[in-house]
Amino acid sequence: MPEIRAKVGSAVGLHARPAALFAAAAAASPVPVMVCKPGGDPVDARSILSVLTLDARFGDELILSAEGPRAAETLASLAQVLETDHDQAQG
């Protein structure tokens, strides 16, 4: 199963807004995606509640995994969402 590691880029971690953006992007992906902290249990990336239970903070490494057609492309796209600081002031 392909996987990719990404660090949380939002300054205050994967709280409600960044988690919602990430879960929505995962839900729109062509393959199911799982996410976890290293050594933790994987959760469904499409579920905002599951993503919030990770208690991921700024700089924490998360592991994304998926299987199926376009899995690598999907993981790269979702890693970019995770690594973006969604807490920056929107102008």
Image (tube, rainbow, N blue to C red):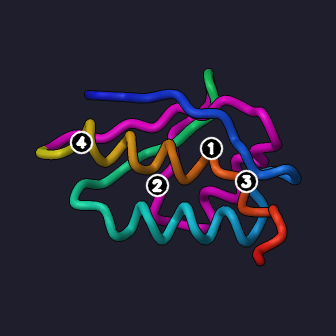
Q: Residue 59 location in percent, x, y?
A: 78, 33
Within the magenta stretch, is there residue 52?
Answer: yes
Name the residue carrying label 3. 85
As drawn, the residue found furthest toward the front would be 91
- Relative height, residue 53 to residue 1 (above, below): below
- Tell me the SS state at disc 4: helix
Depth-wise, is mark 3 or mark 4 nearer the camera? Answer: 3
Q: Amino acid at mark 4?
A: Ala
Mark pair 2, 3: CA separation: 22 Å
Categorize mark 3 by other alpha carbons within 10 Å: few (<14), some (14-19), many (20+).
Answer: some
Q: Amino acid at mark 3?
A: Asp
Depth-wise, is mark 4 or mark 2 nearer the camera? Answer: 4
Q: Is residue 32 left or right of residue 34?
A: left
Name the residue carrying label 4. 71
Q: Residue 87 location in percent, x, y?
A: 80, 63
Q: Nearer the viewer, residue 19 or 34?
A: 19
- Tell me the SS state at disc 1: helix
Residue 44, disc:
2
**Label located before the other in sequence (1 or 4):** 4
**Region of the chain picked out in magenta, as a range:** 39-68
Q: Quadrant of residue 49?
A: bottom right
Depth-wise, is mark 1 or mark 4 nearer the camera? Answer: 1
Q: Residue at x 24, y 42 (%)?
A: 71
Mark pair 1, 3: CA separation: 7 Å
**Label located before the other in sequence (4 or 2):** 2
Name the residue carrying label 1. 83
